[in-house]
Amino acid sequence: MQIPLVSGIRPTYDELGYVISREMFSGREVEEMAREATRLLGRTDLIDSDNIRCRWSNHVDTGECRFDCFDPVIDLSEVFAKVARDPRLLDRAGSLYGERAHLFKDKLIYKPPGAKGYALHQDYISWDSFPETFVTAIVAIDPCDASNGATEVFPGAHKRGLIGERDGKYHPLRDDQVDLSTGVVLTLEPGDVAIFNGYLPHRSGPNRSDRSRRLLYVSYNADRDGGEQRKAHYAEFAHYLQERYAEYGKTNTYFR
């Protein structure tokens, strides 16, 4: 399915559940992000299976568990902190709301060669504190396409609201809950930005290429939905993760 090239057009976003802005960040800015991503990957003092800041992904063929993501990331990096609060991103998100946007969440996903990808899901989770106006901007650091597991979205399905259970837990969606024939792979070049609705079902395939697919994910909420909530969200998120890990006997977790 062909990707419509749109640039902050709210009616299109309302209809499809996503918009793409080409070359929002310059080549120089992307090079700076790439260097910073490489620097952070060298933070072996942080990359630990007990550190709940870190996310992991199995190799699609071998099953080997490997580091995949820092969540959050901007407190580790002035470069990514600047990007997350860049006026271009805030203004674009705000134009979709018709009001001021506030940073809610941030993470850096590396998706190295062999990473298996993410199952079909919606980002919105039905916590009492989770903003209904949640949107995510993905900033491409590397080229993203089907071969390295680019994000695939299902236009228009956000209009159904929450498809999964409203119980405050993360639930992957079944293939029969979405019309898979409508899927659009978000093919992006470095510096491109795609913004999609928190209710928009999406997934990503495995990285079958020989290159990483690094993306900065920054999520926002509208002013009417509680204003700035990032600090409170991550305090709640850390507590949630530690409880979930403890259910599986992992009781030595920490955040650093």
Image (cartoon, helix red, strand yellow):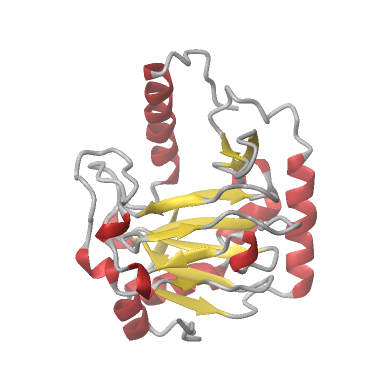
Residue 72 spot, x, y in % from top left: 55, 42
In the displayed structure, 19 sits above or below 209; it is below
Q: Is residue 14 visible?
A: yes
Q: Looking at the figure, which quarter contains the N terminus?
A: bottom left
Residue at 54 percent across and 51 percent down: it is 117
Q: Is residue 102 visible?
A: no
In the displayed structure, 240 sits above or below 74; it is above
In the displayed structure, 78 sits above or below 27; it is above
Q: Looking at the figure, which quarter contains the C terminus?
A: top right
| Corner quadrant of residue 76 | top right
Residue 246 spot, x, y in % from top left: 41, 17
In the displayed structure, 139 sits above or below 230; it is below
| Corner quadrant of residue 50 | top right
Q: Nearer the viewer, residue 107 or 189?
A: 189
Position of residue 4 in the picture relative to residue 40 (left or right): left
Residue 83 spot, x, y in % from top left: 62, 60
> Which residue sits furthest front?
61
Residue 206 spot, x, y in % from top left: 58, 54
Position of residue 141 in the picture relative to residue 127 (left or right): right
Residue at 35 percent across and 67 percent down: it is 180
Residue at 63 percent across and 55 percent down: it is 207
Q: How many marks?
A: 0
Q: Nearer the viewer, residue 227 or 63?
A: 63
